[in-house]
Image (cartoon, rainbow, N blue to C red):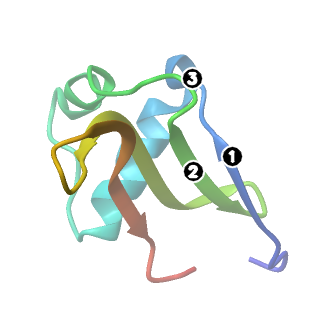
Amino acid sequence: MGDTQVVVRTIDPDREMDAFTATIMAAFGLRPEPGEVERRRRFVEPGRTWMAEIGGEPVGTSRTFASELTLPGGGVVPAGALTAVGVLPTA
């Protein structure tokens, strides 16, 4: 990878779930099993799933999902919970 600029962007789940799934699984030393891409697709919220690329090649992932945070005193506010964070060891 000659280009060292990291580009972080949201993915298009219709076109990039295979790459997203392969990258997050590889970051944890795993390979996707049959049905893994479709299983993960159920949890994707548009605009909340990111991929990092170097030279157009995926090297990292992250995803957030809508959640709530309880404050001291009992108040509740909307929050984004972070998950699916992985970076390939080659990055």
Q: Position of residue 17 (x, y in %)?
A: 44, 31
**Label 2, label 3: how far apart the Cα atoms are:** 13 Å
Q: Position of residue 36 (x, y in %)?
A: 20, 34
Residue shown at 62%/58% (left/top)? Answer: 52
Q: Nearer the viewer, mark 1 or mark 3?
A: 1
73 w.r.t. 77: above or below: below
**Label 1, label 3: how far apart the Cα atoms are:** 14 Å
Q: Position of residue 25 (x, y in %)?
A: 28, 56
Type of amino acid under label 3: Arg
Residue lying at the far front of the rendered structure? 73
Image disc number at residue 9: 1
Image disc number at residue 15: 3
Type of amino acid under label 1: Arg
Residues at discs 1 and 3 in contact (Cβ within 8 Å): no
Type of amino acid under label 2: Met
Residue shown at 44%/82% (left/top)? Answer: 89
